[in-house]
Amino acid sequence: MARKEVVVEDVVRLMANRDRIRNVGIVAHVDHGKTTLSDSLVARAGLISKELAGEQRVLDYDEQEQARGITIKAANISLGFTYDKQEYLVNLIDTPGHVDFGGHVTRAMRAVDGVVLVVDSVEAVMPQTETVLRQALKEKVRPVLFINKIDRLINELKLDAKGMQDRFIKIITSVNNLIETYGPPEFKEEWMIKVEKGNVAFGTGFHKWAISYPRMKETGITFGDIYKFCAEGNHTELQKKAPVDEVILEMVVKHLPSPNTSQRYRIPVIWQGDIASEHGKGMVNCDPNAKVTFMVTAIQVDEHAGEVAIGRIYSGTARKGMDLYMGSQYKTEKLQGVAIYMGPDRVPVEAATAGNIIALVGLGEVYAGETLSEGQMVPFEKIKHHSEPVVTKSIEAKNPRDLVKLIDALRKIAKEDPTVRVEINQETGEHLLSGMGELHLEIIEYKISHERGVAIETSPPIVVYHETIGEEGPEVEGKSPNKHNKFKIQVEPLPETVLKAINEGEIDDKTKGKDLIERLIKAGMERDDAKKVICVYGSNVFIDSTKGVQGLQDIRELLTEAYKDAMKAGPQAKESCVGVVVRLNDATIHVDPAHRGPSQIIPAIKRPIFASMLQAKPALLEPKQKLVVTAPTDYLSGVINQINARRGQVTDIAQDLGASNVTANVPVATMFGFANDIRGATQGRAAWYYEFLGYEKLPASLQGTTIASIRKRKGESEMVPTARDFME
């Protein structure tokens, strides 16, 4: 029997013992060595040879991942291990480290209970390290730490044994500061990283060895020995005494929780339903005999099997042929198959029990974040991505005959990666593709042209701006074209606390009824206003402040449609609006439905919204990035000049081991071409990383020219309309 078949048999057998399951993500900053480390764990389970581990990067099975040497999407593998004479099942997710693919990390955090945080010993805790750890802690996912590439401390930085230990202490302190700041209060002390606890290991994934405090005591290896072996380049001896897979596995088994333990405290965080209900009890107890509850964390589109839903089963046992209710689509579908992932291979299994990361096949249209269950239940909390698409390209098929293929490819890609936004401009017929950054869009373009076989043409990248207001606008009356319907509308800025709650995913357009009212009040909205909210759209709110208006209920859908249209494309630059409260103060509505159709109502709502906004200190917001540049101190002035030339604000300069780390806030719009310029300024010696920082007001001096250029690009007059243009 082939080795892989034996492995699958082992996995299926071990899935039932929930105390010996570990659902683990490997997370890190880009290039800190996650996938190389994963190789050693895969090799231990017998799926690849130990000699190839560290070079094969088996979980980077995507063609572009192999070509670029980075992880682009999360890869799942279920591995059976024997440790200390006990058998364990480790469901492993190798996640991307590049900020453009952070959405995959966010979704993976929902499926796992613990993470191995990998940190490069030379680069230490970087921005993306902070981001992924913060995401894990928010979902009550427990971390252990692996300090990787420690041979670099000796060979490149020429540190001695004492210098190495000081470096480790600095990294551990940085990680503990993050746990102290973002960790769940009840677990902060227990989850702290301490050498003597054994929840931190040091080593090199590439050379396949690692050491932890328990392993030092067991083998008698000291830091002096490590220094000596690394300086001599003798990694073989360390590999024999402390193989990286054993040391990491020991940490995972001893310090990361089983589903039986974790679901007791994680379910109340990710699910707001009644814990005492049938579904609630099943999930908290990780009960394989309860009703099935499943959260989709990723979608893979398979040419033969259709959409494959990957995610975590929290209760029950999934079997082919069972009916599952889809929470966001209010319908039931029959499950065609259950599978587990072995890296690139999806292997069918008879059944899968609670507490595992699995794949479900044949449910038709599925979405990342979807709740699947036996019978109806309250859906899981929405997965909130910490970044949003800030760079857009126009994309067209070179051959008009390929238009249908292009639309199909875009639809599938948007399914697989919810951080991609695809929209069709009905007026121009072009497709707009928005992503997290230039690299994100490059990868998508490659997938369309090479994997889907559609030749495409794209525009240069465009930055996504938002429109907002700075103060309360006047009440404006809007009349329908036939003058039979009148609406009095006013806009005002959304309170900061409510805006924050929406941005953090506590409130969204799917929150309804009493739940919406309570969340808005909790976020700081007046109770009377919260009760009158008709609709939340993006980070904008529509409030009905009218009293006793006849016929308003009959046109409610049209009111909502008009409000959404206005928020999708604001009055200044036709960019989406954020942080706007629209109030309907009064209305006069014709009794005859023939006089109050869409062509009458929609302009009568949109026009006064725009007129009020244009008198409420309207402004454009631009996306900003936190940029960290590391370069030898000799090149510091060159780095700062590059940042200043891009309207960047330097927030911190730190010096460490002959290198300077410059942290700055920079507008996304000025960052195109940065890679070439920074290489030139530092003779190729700089490393840089960035992460999404949010939106800030564009400087007043740039508002007019930026709005005019956006309008021109969209085929509009460059003259910015005034309130009078929208008033009768």
Image (cartoon, rainbow, N blue to C red):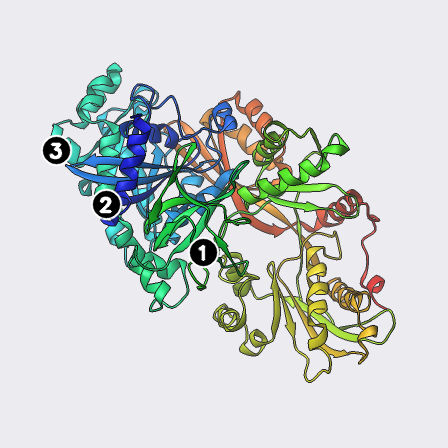
Residue corresponding to mark 3: 217
Label 2: element kind:
helix
Q: CA distance from mark 2 to mark 1?
A: 29 Å
Residue for point 78% across, 66% down: 598
Label 2 or label 1, whichever comes before in sequence order: 2
Q: CA distance from mark 1 to mark 3?
A: 53 Å
Label 2 or label 3, whichever comes before in sequence order: 2
Position in image of residue 255 (x %, y %): 23, 45
Residue corresponding to mark 2: 20
Residue that extends furthest to the front in the rendered view of this protein: 321
Type of amino acid at the residue the image marks with label 1: Asp
Label 3: element kind:
helix
Residue corresponding to mark 1: 323
In which quarter of the view is residue 571 placed?
Answer: bottom right
Closer to the camera, 196 or 472?
196
Position in image of residue 308 (x %, y %): 48, 43
